[in-house]
Image (cartoon, rainbow, N blue to C red):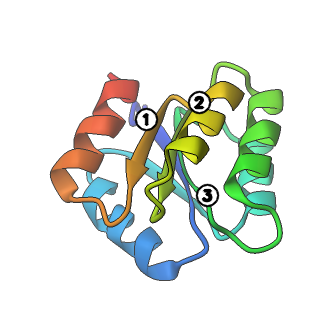
Amino acid sequence: MNSKKKILICDDEEGIRESLKLILENDYDLIFAQNGDEAIQSMRTNRIDVTILDIKMPKKDGLETLKELMRINPSSKVIIATGYKSVDIAKEAMNIGASDYIVKPFDREKITKVVQKYTS
């Protein structure tokens, strides 16, 4: 039986998805989404333990996607990832239901610690 926690990584930048894959693939099952619609579809069809969600994406941004993810699974743990150090966005995301917030570029130790906080 596979007891690894499932993490959904949603970021429109392939480099970010690849970096997170390298950091997390040994300890978690990873699902990747390139945009908000893919993330929403993944949430509907999988039991996701934690989502790492980019804020700045084309079409559907992270906040819109977050609202939809929280509707699908209100107890979902969502970590917002952004390159923009905006306290307002962080507050808004937390009000919508995000569990945490990390600023890109993130280091291996920080991302590992934040993910472990919501998967242990």
Q: Amino acid at mark 3?
A: Ile
Q: Are marks 3 and 2 in contact (CB under 8 Å)?
A: no
Category of crowding for the residue at label 3, using alpha-carbon neighbours closer than 10 angstroms: few (below 14), some (14–19), many (at least 20):
many
Q: What is the number of the mark on residue 71? A: none
| Mark-to-mark CA distance, 1 and 2 | 23 Å
Relative to residue 19, is residue 46 drawn left or right?
A: right
Look at the numbered disc 1 and give the secondary structure of its residue: loop
Image x and y of residue 29, in percent:
44, 48
Image x and y of residue 96, in percent:
70, 30
Q: Which residue is mark 1?
A: 5
Category of crowding for the residue at label 2, using alpha-carbon neighbours closer than 10 angstroms: few (below 14), some (14–19), many (at least 20):
some
Q: Which residue is mark 3?
A: 55
Q: Which residue is mark 2?
A: 94
| Mark-to-mark CA distance, 1 and 3 | 23 Å
Closer to the chain start, of discs 1 and 2, is 1
Closer to the chain start, of discs 3 and 2, is 3
Relative to residue 105, is residue 107 drawn left or right?
A: left
